[in-house]
Amino acid sequence: MITYPSMGKLLKKVDSPYTLVILASRRARQLNVGARGLIEEYKSKKPVSRSLEEIAAGKVTYEIKRRN
């Protein structure tokens, strides 16, 4: 269960829960292979939780590419 950041805060940063899952998993993989963190201090040591903290802080975003 996610306690921090709150699910409500996270869902304000994305258009759907599915987007949140994809965004968090992609960023967690980057952190796993050595990407540097985007915020000063994390509350967690786990890559998935850290990626959620970055999303909540507005440091990780996304862009939807529409097909013509």
Image (cartoon, rainbow, N blue to C red):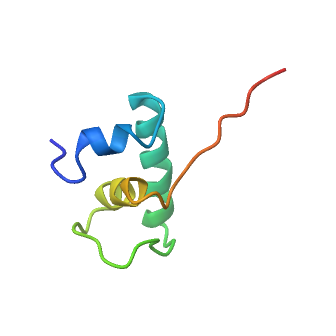
Quarter of the image with the N terminus in it: top left
Count the numbered circles shown: 0
What residue is at 59 percent from the left and 45 percent from the top?
62
Along the viewing direction, whichever of 44 and 6 lies nearer the viewer: 6
What residue is at 65 percent from the left and 35 percent from the top?
64
Along the viewing direction, whichever of 34 and 61 lies nearer the viewer: 61
Please, is residue 58 above or below residue 68 in the view? below
**Percent x, y for residue 65?**
72, 33
Please, is residue 11 above or below residue 61 in the view? above
**Percent x, y for residue 26?**
50, 49
Would residue 30 be found to the left or right of residue 56 on screen?
right
What residue is at 27 percent from the left and 62 percent from the top?
46
Q: Residue furthest top?
A: 68
- The picture quadrant where one finds residue 7 is top left
Would residue 63 be found to the left or right of residue 53 on screen?
right
Quarter of the image with the C terminus in it: top right
- The picture quadrant where one finds residue 67 is top right
What residue is at 23 percent from the left and 66 percent from the top?
44
**Percent x, y for residue 51?**
39, 57
Would residue 52 be found to the left or right of residue 60 on screen?
left
Q: Residue furthest right?
A: 68
